[in-house]
DNA sequence: GCCAACGTTGGC
DNA sequence: GCCAACGTTGGC
């Protein structure tokens, strides 16, 4: 079974691509949205490929690639009152939220921006580019992934 | 189970 | 900093 392709959003002030490079492996915790939780628990698997997207920043867009290196498992920050996103309804016995582990892939020399992506036929339909999209992880097709990487590496 | 109010996200 | 979009909460 071939791996899948995803786009992970991050605000660079919260967690940058450079942080990921420095950390080696990152636990992608803190997701508190049920649709994304389902993907983390059921769909996002070791070996899947990731586009790393910066939101809420000066230059918005995709800055590099990453790889999933660990299947979904319970997000233990949910029952840590000191964490960024505590949720007392989630417990070790009955976890609600899930996370995966990722590692950095290639860093693009420059950000691939939405304005550059929209005119490209294969990319125009990407979920992340839809108005009002607020999902912190969105699926991308293999073609979308490959076209973005080609654009990124050409920079 | 509906839906208004509220809080958050994220592009501009 | 504004505001549209939209997920979640809570009263009924």
Image (spheres, coloured by chain):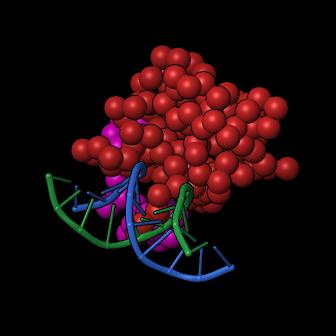
Chain colours: A red, B blue, C green
Q: Position of residue B5 (x, y in %)?
A: 38, 67
Q: Tell me the residue at 75%/44% (across/down).
A: A41
Q: Position of residue A125 (x, y in %)?
A: 50, 70
Q: Nearer the viewer, residue A100 or A50?
A: A100
Tell me if residue A69 is in the magenta stretch.
Answer: no
Where the C terminus of chain A falls, by quadrant?
top left
Q: Nearer the viewer, residue B6 or A20?
A: B6
Q: Position of residue A1 (x, y in %)?
A: 85, 50
- On screen, residue A90 versus residue A137, left or right, reads right
- On screen, residue C3 versus residue A121, left or right, reads left
Residue A113 seen anywhere in this rendered image of the structure: yes
Q: Tell me the residue at 58%/42% (across/down).
A: A31
- Residue range (magenta): A108-130
Q: Nearer the viewer, residue A50 or A37?
A: A37
Check the image and report above or below for A140 versus A59.
below
Check the image and report above or below for A128 versus A73.
below
Q: Nearer the viewer, residue A85 or B3?
A: B3
Q: Position of residue A46 (x, y in %)?
A: 75, 36
Tell me if residue A121 is in the magenta stretch.
Answer: yes
Q: Tell me the residue at 53%/17% (across/down).
A: A23
- On screen, residue A150 versus residue A79, left or right, reads left
Q: Write down the quadrant of residue A79 in the picture.
A: top right
- On screen, residue A23 versus residue A19, left or right, reads right
Q: Write down the quadrant of residue A118 in the picture.
A: bottom left
């Amino acid at each position: 079974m071939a791996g899948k392709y995803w786009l992970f959003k991050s605000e660079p002030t919260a967690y940058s691509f450079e942080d990921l490079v420095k950390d080696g492996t990152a636990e992608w915790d803190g997701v508190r949205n049920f649709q994304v939780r389902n993907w983390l628990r059921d769909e996002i698997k070791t070996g899947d490929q990731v586009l790393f997207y910066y939101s809420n920043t000066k230059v918005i867009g995709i800055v590099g690639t990453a790889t999933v290196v660990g299947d979904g498992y319970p997000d233990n920050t949910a029952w840590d009152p000191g964490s960024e996103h505590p949720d007392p309804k989630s417990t070790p016995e009955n976890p609600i939220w899930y996370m995966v582990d990722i590692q950095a892939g290639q860093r693009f020399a420059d950000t691939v921006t939405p304005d550059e992506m929209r005119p490209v036929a294969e990319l125009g339909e990407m979920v992340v580019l839809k108005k009002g999209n607020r999902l912190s992880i969105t699926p991308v097709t293999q073609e979308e992934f490959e076209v973005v990487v080609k654009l990124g590496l050409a920079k």
